[in-house]
Amino acid sequence: NAGVTQTPKFQVLKTGQSMTLQCAQDMNHEYMSWYRQDPGMGLRLIHYSVGAGITDQGEVPNGYNVSRSTTEDFPLRLLSAAPSQTSVYFCASTTPSGGSLGYTFGSGTRLTVV
Amino acid sequence: GQSLEQPSEVTAVEGAIVQINCTYQTSGFYGLSWYQQHDGGAPTFLSYNGLDGLEETGRFSSFLSRSDSYGYLLLQELQMKDSASYFCAVRKGGANNLFFGTGTRLTVIP
């Protein structure tokens, strides 16, 4: 049981480049979300999905797109990378009653935009 | 929106007890969660309080008072491996989203 798998683990982008951060879970969780973590700011919600075909914006969605074509996968797309998007990105998943069961987080993608 | 406040740093002695407080302001409150994160690692789930009172899981306990918009995480018999950052997070109704505080860095000293 792999849990939540994120790829790549590290990435360096040039300003203006685009890329997709991959996230896959094998727990049949309906809910998936993306967070970014910056020093001293905790985790901030970017986008989330309550099931295949359904996505919505979180606290800081600008500059990011998501899609959810399957239950397992929830990729995050950076449209035109900016230095302000340098951060650690975490994908998480849970069941509909996940508050009490907790979120399962991936190991993160450390992104640097130069 | 929502806001959560927790101390930025706490230092405690190995074997002792430490309490990390969290106060929150939010609409649509469902419950309060706690997560642990070691440096360079992913957050891991510790506990959840949906109702007022104390929840105990081994050496860790968590408390919630909805009327005071306040909770805390209690760590007993501290071990060196407990040195990490601890985040409180409010669970909001509807989509089951979690919103995190800025974290408390716990340092356990010998």
Image (cartoon, rainbow, N blue to C red):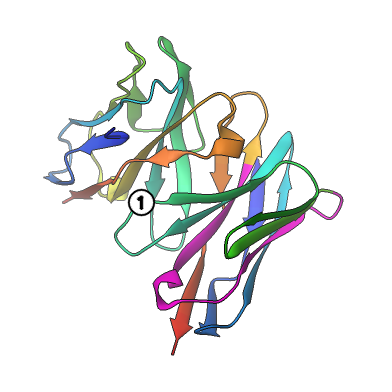
Which residue is located at x 58 percent, y 60 percent?
B58
Would you identify the image quadrant in which residue B10 lies? bottom right
Q: Is residue B95 magenta?
A: no
Residue at the far front: name it.
B58
- Residue B11 can be seen in this image: yes
Would you identify the image quadrant in which residue B83 lies? bottom left
Q: Position of residue B71 (x, y in %)?
A: 72, 58
Q: Secondary structure at mark 1?
A: loop
Label 1 neighbour load within 10 Å: few <14, some 14-19, many 20+:
some
Residue identified by numbered label 1: B42
Q: Position of residue A44 (x, y in %)?
A: 47, 45
Q: Name the image quarter holding the N terminus of chain A.
A: top left
Q: Chain of mark 1?
A: B
Q: Position of residue A25 (x, y in %)?
A: 32, 27
Q: Is residue B20 above or below residue B101?
A: below
Front-lying residue, A38 or B54? B54
The kind of residue tagged 1 is Ala
Q: Is residue B17 above or below residue B72?
A: below
Front-lying residue, B68 or B108? B108
- Range shown magenta: B67-90
- Residue A55 can be seen in this image: no
Front-lying residue, B87 or A42? B87
Q: Is residue B53 left or right of residue B109?
A: right
Which residue is located at x 52 percent, y 40 percent?
A102
Q: Is residue A20 left or right of residue B30?
A: left
Which residue is located at x 45 percent, y 87 percent?
B109
Q: Is residue B81 magenta?
A: yes
Q: Position of residue B82 (x, y in %)?
A: 45, 70
Residue at the far bottom: name it.
B110
